[in-house]
Image (spheres, rainbow, N blue to C red):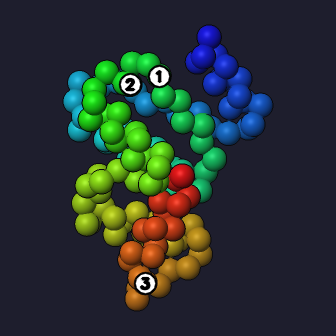
Amino acid sequence: GKKSLCCLASAVLGVEREQIRNGETEGWFRDNVKEIMRKIGGKRKAVLLVVTDENFGDIDIVQDLASLVSEGSIPSLWSSEEQSTVIAEFQTVQGMEDPSFDRVAWWRSFAQGIR
């Protein structure tokens, strides 16, 4: 079915496939999404994100997915400290480490890579 088609598509495209796993809480879902976002935005890896029907059971998760697709981020997903860590990793990948960086611009660039 649909999952098999996604597996085939990722193999044909030569990209990694990530699936949003189901968990008991929205917090668990958000931690899973953070891992995936670091791969996509921070490391600039091409990833096929698979979202199944089961992921649409919780309205908060649906809203988070909508924000991820439209904005490239989820509101209040990252703490300030986590953002700094992700930005530093992203700068390293981009080869532009700079202690006087514009945090907002770097974060936008990270989010743009996700969309």
Label 1: state its secondary structure. loop
**Residue tagged 1:** 52
Picture layout, residue 17 above or below residue 78 = above
Q: Is residue 10 left or right of residue 47?
A: right
Does the rendering let one see residue 28? no
Q: Position of residue 11 (x, y in %)?
A: 72, 30
Figure label count: 3
The answer to whether any part of residue 31 appears in the image is yes
Measure the alpha-carbon separation of dots 2 and 3.
37 Å
* Three-letter amino acid code of the residue under disc 2: Asn
Q: What element does badge 2 sit on? A: helix
Report the front residue among 104 and 40. 104
Residue 108: x percent and y percent? 46, 68
- Position of 72 relative to 26 (above/below): below
Write down the quadrant of residue 14 in the picture: top right
Residue 26 is left or right of residue 4, and the answer is: left
Mark 2, mark 3: which one is toward the viewer?
A: 2
Tell me the residue at 39%/47% (across/down). 67
Q: Which residue is mark 2?
A: 55
- The answer to which of 55 and 34 lies nearer the viewer is 55
Residue in the picture at 37% in, 24% down = 56
Q: In the image, what residue type sits under mark 1? A: Thr
Amino acid of disc 3: Phe
Res 18 label: none
Residue that badge 3 annotates: 101
